[in-house]
Image: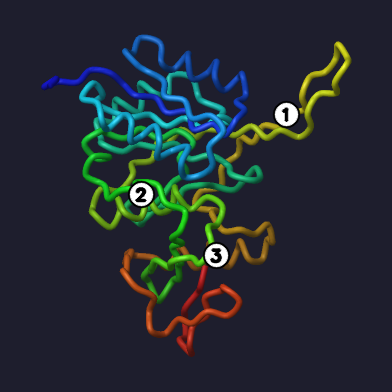
């Protein structure tokens, strides 16, 4: 058994395709590191994360795991800067669907309550300690702002929803007093607009690049009024509470959380 593992495990949880520019940027960031890439071809969420992670944890060669999703835009030199933080879990924020939104929500101290898994560096010992499977898509974390408190609670889903693996990971870490450390530098994301036309020499793909991050803008809306209300509510937040059950004053209508007669409460 290696007492001092020295290799970095790199997980590319691609479900079949990867932007070549993303791979070029990843190789640039890995230059100088002793690493091994773990691929995950053609697998759905969360298997494309869990399967390579389980393989890594069976070995004693690796001291940390870097997750790099196949559509990221990576700032130059960012991986070394993440290691320089000397913290067990470090992540980059990036726009998710549109310029100006975000995958990361911060607590009042500036820690990430959760983040996306687009570029996430995590110590192997932390992964070992987490409940298995590490990545889950059967649990949603609902949120409300009650007075000056940002409240979270888990809700088991009757059917698997898209994503959620990243939020659930962040919430488990946060609840166990090991919040993700965010980098000030943010990343971007590539979106495939249209595949190149076949049977032509000019068959390049149309790719859109998202590069603008709106801090904490993780809500699923582009309505300016709703964004304004959300941000005003966040200004009240002084603390965060993570519950292990649905609050008694919450009920659900068509899957949407609603508050039973409580004033000064915002359901996000």
Density class for disc 2 (Cα within 10 Å; few <14, some 14-19, many ≥20) is: few
Quadrant in which residue 73 is drawn? top right
Q: In screen coordinates, is 70 left or right of 141?
A: right
Residue 207, numbered label: 1
> Image point 51% across, 47% down: which residue?
103
Residue name at image x 52 percent, y 79 percent: 252
Q: Nearer the viewer, residue 36 or 173?
A: 36
> Quarter of the image containing the N terminus?
top left
How far across and down, in percent of the image, does residue 257 sit?
52, 75
Q: Which mark is residue 230?
A: 3
Residue that label 2 marks: 110
3D distance between C-alphas at marks 2 and 1:
33 Å
> Few, some or many C-alpha atoms within 10 Å of disc 1 (few <14, some 14-19, many ≥20)?
some
Spot the residue most to the right.
200
Mark sitting earlier along the chain (3/1): 1
Q: Nearer the viewer, mark 3 or mark 1?
A: 1
Disc with the residue nearer the chain's start (2 vs 3): 2
Classify 217 as above or below 17: below
Looking at this rendering, what residue extends furthest in the bottom direction?
A: 261
Give the left or right position of residue 232, taking residue 203 as reference. left
Residue 263 location, x and y as percent? Answer: 47, 85
Residue at 40% across / 52% down in the picture? Answer: 106
């Amino acid at each position: 058994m290696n007492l001092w593992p020295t290799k970095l495990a790199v997980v590319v949880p691609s479900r079949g395709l990867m932007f070549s520019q993303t791979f070029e940027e990843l190789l640039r960031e890995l230059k100088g590191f002793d690493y091994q890439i773990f691929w995950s071809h053609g697998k759905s969420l969360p298997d494309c994360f869990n399967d390579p992670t389980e393989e890594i944890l069976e070995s004693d060669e690796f001291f940390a795991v870097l997750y790099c999703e196949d559509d990221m835009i990576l700032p130059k030199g960012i991986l070394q800067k993440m290691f320089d933080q000397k913290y067990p879990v470090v992540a980059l924020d990036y726009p998710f669907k549109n310029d100006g939104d975000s995958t990361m929500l911060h607590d009042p101290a500036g820690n990430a309550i959760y983040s996306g898994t687009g570029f996430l560096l995590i110590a192997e010992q932390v992964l070992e300690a987490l409940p298995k499977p590490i990545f889950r898509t059967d649990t949603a974390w609902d949120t409300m702002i009650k007075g000056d408190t940002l409240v979270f609670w888990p809700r088991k889903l009757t059917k698997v929803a898209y994503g959620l693996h990243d939020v659930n990971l962040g919430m488990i870490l946060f609840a166990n007093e090991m919040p993700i450390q965010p980098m000030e530098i943010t990343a971007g994301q590539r979106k495939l607009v249209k595949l190149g036309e076949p049977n032509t020499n000019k068959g390049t793909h149309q790719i859109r690049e998202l590069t603008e991050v709106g801090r904490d803008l993780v809500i699923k809306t582009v309505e300016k009024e709703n964004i304004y209300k959300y941000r005003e509510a966040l200004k009240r937040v002084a603390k965060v509470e993570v519950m292990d059950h649905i609050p008694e004053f919450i009920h659900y209508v068509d899957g949407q959380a609603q508050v039973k007669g409580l004033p000064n409460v915002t359901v996000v």
